[in-house]
Image (tube, helix red, strand yellow):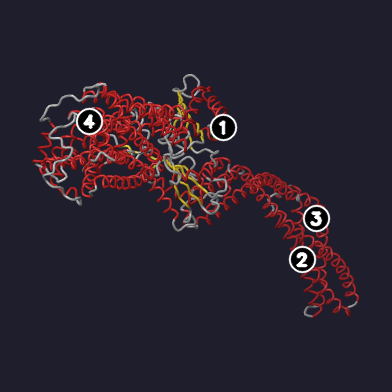
Amino acid sequence: MADNGRVSGLAAFAVKRAVWVLVAWLVLAAALNVFVPQIEEVAAKDSTAVVPEKAPSIIAVEEMGEAFGNGGANSFVVIAMERDGGLEPTDKQYAARLATVLTKDDENVTFVQDVRKNPELLGALTSTDGEARYVLVGITGVTGAPSSIRQVTAVRDVAADLAPDGLDVAVTGPTATITDLATETEHSVVRITVVSIGLIALLLWLIYRSFAVMAVVLGIVGLGLGLARALTALCGELGLFTVSTFSGTFLTAVVLGAGTDYAIFLVSRYQELRREGMPPEEAAATAGARLTGVITGSALTVVLACGCMLLADLGFFSTTGPAIAVSVAINLLVAITLTPALLAMAGRRGWCEPRATKAGGLWPRLAGLVVAHPARMLAVSLVPLLALAALAPLIAVSYDTRDSQPAATESNRGYAMLDRHFPVNEILPDYVLIQADHDLRNPRDLALLERAASAVAQEEGVVLVRSITRPLGEPITDATVARQAGIVGVRLDRASDRIGDGEGGAQQLADGAGELGDGADQLSDGTGQLADGADRAVDGADRLVAGTADLEQGVRRLLAGADQAVTGTGQLATGMRQLARGLSTGADQVQLAVDGLGLAYDALRTKSLTCNVDPACRQAREGIRQIWVAERDELLPGLREAARAADQLADGTVGLQDGLRQLRDGLRQAREGADQLADGQQVFADRLGGLADGADQPADGADQLADGASQLEGGTEEVAASLPELRQGLTRAATYLRQTSAVANDPSIGGFYLPPAALENQRFAAAMRLFLSPDGRTARFAVLGATDAFGHEASARTHEIEGTVEQAFNDTRLADADVSMTGMAATNSDLADYSQSDMRAVAIAALVAVFLVLLVLLRSPIAAAMLMATVVLSYASAIGLSVLVWQVLLDSQLDWTVMAVAFTILVAVGADYNLLLTKRMHEEAPDGSKAGIARATAATGSVITSAGVIFAASMFALMAGSVTTMAHVGFTIGAGLLLDTFVVRSLLVPAVATLLGPRLWWPADREPKDREPKDRVAGTAAT
């Protein structure tokens, strides 16, 4: 490479003005570190979330906050408290004091779940064993943002200060988990830096065995690190890009490795030139001139590759990549200016001089072996690389930030505390958000919500679903159709109970009614018979009186007629006819009387139950019998006989004398009968009072009827009192049945019916505030999974749950509702999607950028493509080795950050090493000669190996931290660098270059084979 142009002038200027260059860099570093806030301070002002705001889970969180209200909180933490043996009164007072104090902290806290304002939540927030409780606190910082770290710390300070003795308190939750991860990462920086510098110093000593070289390199790297941190903080302060807590950690590791590499490249070339006898200042300037292009290209691959992380959506990449790019860029300037200056200054004093090397060392022999058997060495290098690369697809990426930090962090202690007393994932539920275009507070939509909740509850891995229809995790029993039938049954039972209470009265009513019936029957019989007999007796008596009068008149007439007959027979016929008619009429009237008296007598004798025991009634009955018998046996026959005789006289059928004799006899009997009749009438008249006395019998029956009626009245009153309640219960039951029938006819109801009145229930209203928005248009389910909320199964389950809910709403009135998921599992699912898309974007951009840099520097697409293929293979092998070590041997899934970060660094740094080797090949073997390739491989073997080992050591130093995320990244990159150093660069690239020969430099013109490289170094390597 020609030592002309700006590059050569820059190196020469740095050597000539070495002191000024050193002072300028020191002043710049001091000024930046004095006037620019430290990177930690700048990072603390950041509000970048781990997952971008456009992620579905984050959008769902915002929409859920708008619908249900979150007090302006952007994230939440949980204050968990536990006391063995049960919470004491002081512990319960502690929760109240927490709410009071935290509510006043407007700067950090926006919301505190105060059970004093919501007493119904107390039971839900307290464990069933009474030993634990938790309180939800909202903060303004977004989860993962440095501002949230400060706010979580403030909450923790208050919680710890107020905690009573013996109460174990821990602030936990996803936001607290990210805070602990960031805090552990920040605390690990010092340890990582110390370990890294120690390893670098040790390796430098082992490689160069010179304190001066070690001091120069460490001085350059230390100054570069100070400048990198300050410049990154300045960029963050100016808003050029965002700086996070992770920015400082990873830039430290990369700067220590890359800065050391650049310094080693220059030191090694400087010592190589010194071995050739070149003066110190000239050697420093020449080394700078010849390697500035290579180092610049090498740094550009890292800068561009890391800069491509700006394309990422995830805050981890977008804040880490640019910080590394700026840091490497400033270290590039330090390397190509300060390193030659310090080498020149050290050379004047005899420092940093090369040590003697043994000819025919390891690297020349290895290089000769590779070019002698390129195909065999290609196979030897490819077999382990491909074998390891084959394991790469088996990678199981972890998004568990809990597992990335020690178990002793406060958030992990809080999780363990809650897991001991509450259902799994109590504070890490998945939320299903359902947004409709109408009010959901109606039986049909509530039934559809229950239908969806029931379907989710049946998903594999789901332990519990809480919703408006199942606030405690189980369906509201009152809302099932079976329960509605039960309600009807209960209400009918109550009515039955009330009727049962009236059974005694009803029995009295029945008894009284029975007695009333008996008395009424007796009264009916007695009074009926009496009425009939009395009526007939009255009629007969009236007729008897009339007949008796007629009879008396008739007898008188008869006597008069008889007298006249005696005195005058001339009027006999006429008199006889009149007499016959009178006698016949009298006989008829007597017959009526006889019939009436017979009926009365028969009634009193056979149908009256009381007359036989009543003496007065018996006497009256006997008098009636005598009258009846006399009239029947004597009076009535005599009248009939007299009438016939009169007729015979009138007709002349008998002799007058006989007729008169018979007439006289008949009149005589008639007179005797009349006398008896008169006597009987007298007896009858005398006994009518007795008959009236016999009317007491109906009165007694009436008394019994009155008693029965009184009992009937009492029972009736009890029945009457029960009947309104019975009617009301039956009415309510009928209403339930009608409503249930009307709604249950909808097939979508599915056996669930919650009546509108239930929405007004106080207990239901409490659940409504948690699971239904105030406008009723948004509902949410809280789903508790059986597996780790940070794990793959939980993340995968969120998609299944979302699909299940949407399927439950198909062909229903909620078919157009928006269904979304949020929560830790949903966020991790989005994190997985974004990390994969970011990996693709960053990888493609980095490959293109690095390829273009290689193409510009090498001016050969074949060489550039070959190098790109080797670094990609090196990356895949590194991932496979990490899978083997971490997943297979240590049973630890690789963190999600590993793939993207490792790809970016390994591709960029691997390209650096291969670029350095390939550029040297072009110098030594532009014609593709094996000898030139061997010389280039031997010459760069020591320096590239040293650089690779030191860079790997700086990355392995990340494993000294307490965060497994850094351990995974550090191991993967470190292992990849070692594979690239010892296998790819030492075996694979020289073997491929040997097989390709001059074709490697296509389309460049071939140079004459007899041309010796200008800067030929035969078979020696820098040490």
- x then y, percent, for residue 322: 38, 39
Q: Which residue is mark 1?
A: 106
Query: Label 2 crowding class (10 Å Cα cut-off): few <14, some 14-19, many 20+?
Result: many
Please name which of the two marks, 2 or 4, marks the residue nearer to the observer: 4
Q: Is residue 193 above or below residue 615?
A: above
Q: Quadrant of residue 876?
A: top left
- What amino acid type should be assigned to the residue bearing mark 3? Phe
Name the residue nearer the viewer: 215 or 162.
215
Q: Earlier in the sequence, mark 2 or mark 4?
A: 4
Q: Secondary structure at mark 1?
A: loop
| Mark carried by residue 268 | 4
Q: CA distance from mark 1 to mark 3?
A: 117 Å
Q: Quadrant of residue 949?
A: top left
Q: Earlier in the sequence, mark 1 or mark 3?
A: 1
Q: Which residue is mark 2?
A: 592
Q: Secondary structure at mark 4?
A: helix
- What amino acid type should be assigned to the residue bearing mark 1? Asp
- What amino acid type should be assigned to the residue bearing mark 2? Leu
- x then y, percent, for residue 1019: 12, 34
* Residue beneath the point at 17% across and 34% down: 939
Q: CA distance from mark 3 to mark 2?
A: 16 Å
Q: Quadrant of the N terminus?
A: top left
Query: Label 4 crowding class (10 Å Cα cut-off): few <14, some 14-19, many 20+?
Result: many
* Residue beneath the point at 44% across and 23% down: 84
Q: CA distance from mark 1 to mark 4?
A: 59 Å
Query: Is 68 placed left or right of 720 in the picture?
Result: left
Q: Which residue is mark 3?
A: 684
Q: Are marks 4 and 3 in contact (CB under 8 Å)?
A: no
